[in-house]
Image (cartoon, grey):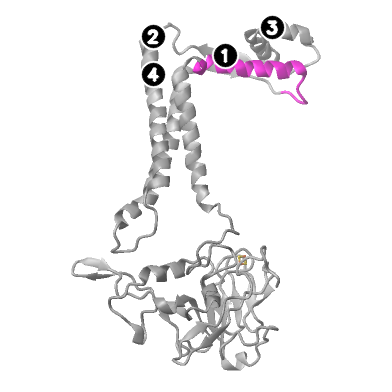
Amino acid sequence: MSDNNKKQYTKEELDKMSNGELARLGTELDGVTVAYRKERFPIANDPAEKRAGLAVGTYFALSIVFGLAFIATYLFWPWEYKHLGQDGLGWYTLYTPLLGITSGLAIILLGMGCVKYTKTFVPEEISVQTRHDGPSEEVDKRTLVALLNDSWQTSTIGRRPVIAGLAGTGAVLAGLAIILPMGGIIKNPWKPKAMGISGDGTLWTTGWTLANKGEERIYLGRDNGNIAEEHDGHWSTEGVSRLVRMRADDLDAGAMETVFPLPASMVNDGDKYDAHKDVYTEHMHSIHGARNAVMLIRLRHEDAKKAVLRTGQEDFHAGDYFAYSKICTHIGCPTSLYEQQTNRILCPCHQSQFDALHYGKPVFGPAARALPQLPIAVDEEGYMYAKKDFVEPVGPAFWERRS
Ligand code: FES
């Protein structure tokens, strides 16, 4: 940009120059050659300029409309899960598509408005500049600021307050359309709520925590994948059990199954089956509970005899059955794979491996903590249940863990 042969300007000389003079000086000092320049509307009060302004304003106004529609949808549309046959399923189904459509259109229309404005109002110009090495001098910095000011003036946006306002509002709303959805994932992990099938909202409670209250038995529920059934032309979950109680003889030796907390009051199977009872929603809440999933493993008998029991957890297993949290202690993926020959549990995310014969302790990969073990037992009818909650928080090792 600057070189030793050019005129050196003092601070006073620069102070005396107008913005236009500084901008021109900057162009010269930068070795910029304006090869071509043409004003878009050289004649004042050209009706075509007004029409162009209207078109640009329309893009920005529509961007605002869709930005506001996105915020209204995000805040007020019925978003809570509805299963097949439940009232309001149609409205709920539209929630995500509407968020996508409104935010997408707000951003796209804002972009189209900006492109249209640039193509319509900013002077057409082709400039050529040579490159330079080293840091910039004071005169270069000052003239650069002047050039930016000059660009603002030649863009004419400063004298089009309506378009500037519409563009600014559209940009803010489009930005909100990107940022606002993150609000749903910002939560206070220490704030307890009413205790339910997913815990009390804090990180160290789960649906199994209900077992500590002692008010009712918490069975190990197996997910049978049932969905709403059609009766006389309408869908209903009445009498449909998504979770059923696990029996001690349901698994073969060397097998693994994922189970979820199933309180006695939500049981609808076996001798407790009632065709008019509807517990489907509660079952789904249990399945969706972020920390509820547990791997129930039936070790082969000869392996179970070799199991190393952790101090204080000697009675956590029920015969050959061992239950470990499915949430990986690395960063929380489901540790879905069990290899019966080696008795290893594998997390597919980063290949951590845990030893099911050794209280779920990590033996390979980035996980540094054992999988929490759920204390289980079998009742007089042969159903499996949780004797109490985990003795430590489940999931990644970065909170409240001692082991
Ligand atoms: S989350 Fe399991 S290994 Fe990373």
**Which residue type does callout 4 highlight?**
Ala
Could you classify mark 3 by the number of other residues whose Cα lies within 10 Å: few (under 14), some (14-19), or many (20 or more)?
few
Please give the label number shown on residue 88.
none
Tell me if I can see residue 99 in this picture. Answer: no
Please give the label number shown on residue 52.
4
Q: Position of residue 252 (x, y in %)?
A: 48, 88
Q: Which residue is mark 1?
A: 35
Please give the label number shown on residue 17.
3
Please tell me how many numbered marks the rendered image carries. Answer: 4
Spatial separation of the CA atoms under disc 1 and disc 4: 26 Å
Q: Position of residue 337 (x, y in %)?
A: 55, 75
**Which residue type does callout 2 highlight?**
Asp
Which of 305/117 is in front?
305
Could you classify mark 2 by the number of other residues whose Cα lies within 10 Å: few (under 14), some (14-19), or many (20 or more)?
few
Q: Point out the tag, 3 or 1, that comes first from the N-terminus.
A: 3
Q: Which residues are magenta?
A: 132-158
The majority secondary structure of the magenta stretch comes to helix
Spatial separation of the CA atoms under disc 1 and disc 2: 26 Å
Element carrying mark 2? loop
Spatial separation of the CA atoms under disc 4 and disc 2: 10 Å
Identify which residue is drawn at 35% across, 87% down. 271
Please give the label number shown on residue 46.
2
Q: Point out the tag, 4 or 2, that comes first from the N-terminus.
A: 2
